[in-house]
């Protein structure tokens, strides 16, 4: 069986990790997989059977996007960086993968060049027997010095990479809208379609899950991904809940995300203690099951949450993240709004009375059907298998 080494570094939320692991889930029948995680581990996060996971000492970024920081480790950042660099090379030399798949880099995560460049150089030193693949979402973050940024991307892609897989639908969101020099890449470039999560055949539900999912009341599901951002969305929903209750009976299920601050979590629980129609949890591996049951989803606009909305067809309201000038979620959500698939939440909508009114209106709407390519997992597997397929020997 061919071997695949997958590198993923998440630094703010868990979206990159979720998408990467869903891709891996679709590859386990064809590849022996070593998954290298450079971010925080998530309690309860499901790993596909048969996948070896190596958790490097975690590194994250601060809320201002300025500095890297070590997570739960007494060593300095420089010491951890040196350890991670050596550990990656050790894993590569020991595992000897047929494919090295790197999520996002060099289109992003360039601050992790301290470990990725030595890894890519090692592939080169071994005669490029290992094929190198970039796994990229549909929209990349643009920079102030975009021309220089794109020049660097082209240089690195052309020097080290054999394949670029764009996990999106070109007809809906061409990469050229956020990266203008795709025609200057020498490697093969393929759109895979969007990567979507599949529903577990036998999901493991706790008593809390079962109670909510069996409720006969309309369910309003609220989630904000990893939980570092979007606090104002949940706070506004809690304030709007009594107003909504006067109009329509409902049950609100809130998932704050694993990185939601402890003090805010405690405050939110205390403020809703006398509101039995609101249930608050940090994280669930069964978010898709909640989406399928919900009458309305209220969320941030991350890639994976958006895909869950598209596959379940749930009514949805979405607040795009705009920190650090990142327009990824805004671009995607506004395009989907124009297609009548979801409703974008603007800052003025978060005033509790306005929010309650918008929620009630959305509950009465029927979203338009989705006509995007959602075959990202299967097509990724096909492209990777094609990359390492042994050529037929002439008779």
Image (tube, rainbow, N blue to C red):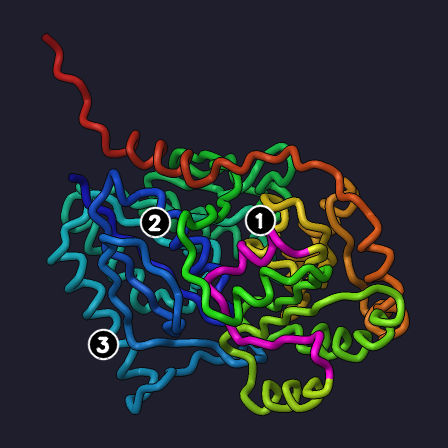
Q: Which residues are magenta?
A: 275-294
Instruction: Answer above or below: position of 358 versus 237.
Output: above
Q: Nearer the viewer, residue 238 or 380?
A: 238
- Magenta region includes residue 317: no
Q: Secondary structure at mark 3?
A: helix
Q: Which residue is mark 1?
A: 307
Residues at circles 2 and 3 in contact by the CB criterion of under 8 Å: no
Within 10 Å of disc 3 (Cα), the crowding (few <14, some 14-19, many 20+) is: some
Q: Quadrant of the C terminus?
A: top left
Judged left or right of residue 267, residue 15 is left
- Magenta region includes residue 291: yes
Q: Which residue is mark 3?
A: 83
Measured in 3D between alpha carbons, the distance from the residue under mark 2 to the one under mark 3, in whole angstroms, is 25 Å
Q: Quadrant of the N terminus?
A: top left
* Numbered label tally: 3
Q: Secondary structure at mark 1?
A: helix
Measured in 3D between alpha carbons, the distance from the residue under mark 1 to the one under mark 3, in whole angstroms, is 36 Å
Within 10 Å of disc 2 (Cα), the crowding (few <14, some 14-19, many 20+) is: many
Instruction: Answer above or below: position of 275 versus 233.
Output: below
Residues at circles 1 and 3 in contact by the CB criterion of under 8 Å: no
Q: Please name which of the two marks, 2 or 3, marks the residue nearer to the observer.
A: 2
Q: Nearer the viewer, residue 135 or 26?
A: 26
Q: Position of residue 94 (x, y in %)?
A: 11, 58
Q: Nearer the viewer, residue 140 or 284?
A: 284
Give the residue drawn at x 81%, y 64%.
Answer: 346
Q: Which residue is mark 2?
A: 24
Residue 148 showing in the rendered view? no
Pick out the residue farthest to the top. Answer: 395
Q: Which badge, 2 or 3, is on the more N-terminal residue?
A: 2
Give the residue drawn at x 35%, y 43%.
Answer: 26
Give the residue drawn at x 51%, y 69%.
Answer: 13
């Amino acid at each position: 069986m061919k071997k695949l080494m997958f590198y993923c570094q998440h630094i703010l939320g868990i979206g990159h990790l979720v998408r990467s692991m869903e891709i891996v889930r679709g590859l386990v029948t064809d590849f022996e997989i070593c998954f290298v995680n450079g971010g925080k581990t998530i309690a309860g996060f499901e790993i596909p059977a048969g996948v070896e996971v190596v958790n490097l000492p975690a590194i994250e970024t601060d809320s201002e996007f300025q500095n890297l920081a070590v997570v739960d480790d007494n060593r300095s950042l420089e010491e951890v960086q040196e350890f991670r660099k050596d550990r990656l090379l050790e894993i590569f030399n020991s595992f000897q993968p047929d494919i090295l798949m790197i999520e996002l880099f060099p289109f992003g995560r360039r601050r992790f060049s301290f470990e990725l460049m030595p890894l890519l150089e090692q592939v080169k030193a071994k005669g490029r027997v290992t094929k190198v693949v970039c796994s990229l979402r549909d929209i990349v973050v643009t920079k102030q010095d975009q021309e220089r940024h794109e020049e660097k991307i082209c240089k690195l892609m052309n020097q080290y990479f054999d394949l670029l897989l764009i996990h999106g639908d070109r007809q809906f969101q061409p990469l050229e809208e956020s990266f203008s020099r795709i025609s200057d890449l020498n490697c093969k470039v393929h759109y895979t379609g969007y990567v979507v999560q599949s529903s577990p055949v036998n999901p493991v539900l706790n008593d809390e899950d079962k109670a909510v999912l069996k409720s006969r009341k309309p369910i309003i599901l609220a989630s904000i991904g990893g939980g570092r951002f979007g606090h104002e969305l949940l706070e506004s929903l809690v304030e709007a809940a009594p107003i909504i209750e006067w109009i329509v009976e409902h049950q609100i299920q809130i998932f704050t995300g694993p990185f939601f601050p402890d003090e805010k979590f405690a405050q939110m629980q205390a403020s809703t203690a006398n509101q039995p129609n609101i249930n608050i949890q940090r994280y669930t591996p069964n978010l898709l099951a909640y989406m399928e049951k919900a009458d309305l989803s209220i969320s941030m606009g991350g890639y994976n949450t958006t895909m869950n909305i598209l596959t379940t067809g749930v009514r949805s309201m979405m607040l795009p993240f705009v920190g650090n000038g990142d327009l990824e979620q805004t671009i995607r959500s506004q395009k989907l709004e124009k297609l009548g698939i979801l409703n974008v939440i603007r800052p003025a909508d978060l005033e509790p009375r306005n929010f309650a009114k918008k929620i009630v209106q959305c509950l009465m709407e029927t979203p338009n059907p989705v006509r995007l390519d959602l075959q990202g997992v299967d097509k990724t597997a096909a492209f990777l298998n094609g990359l390492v397929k042994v050529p037929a020997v002439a008779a």
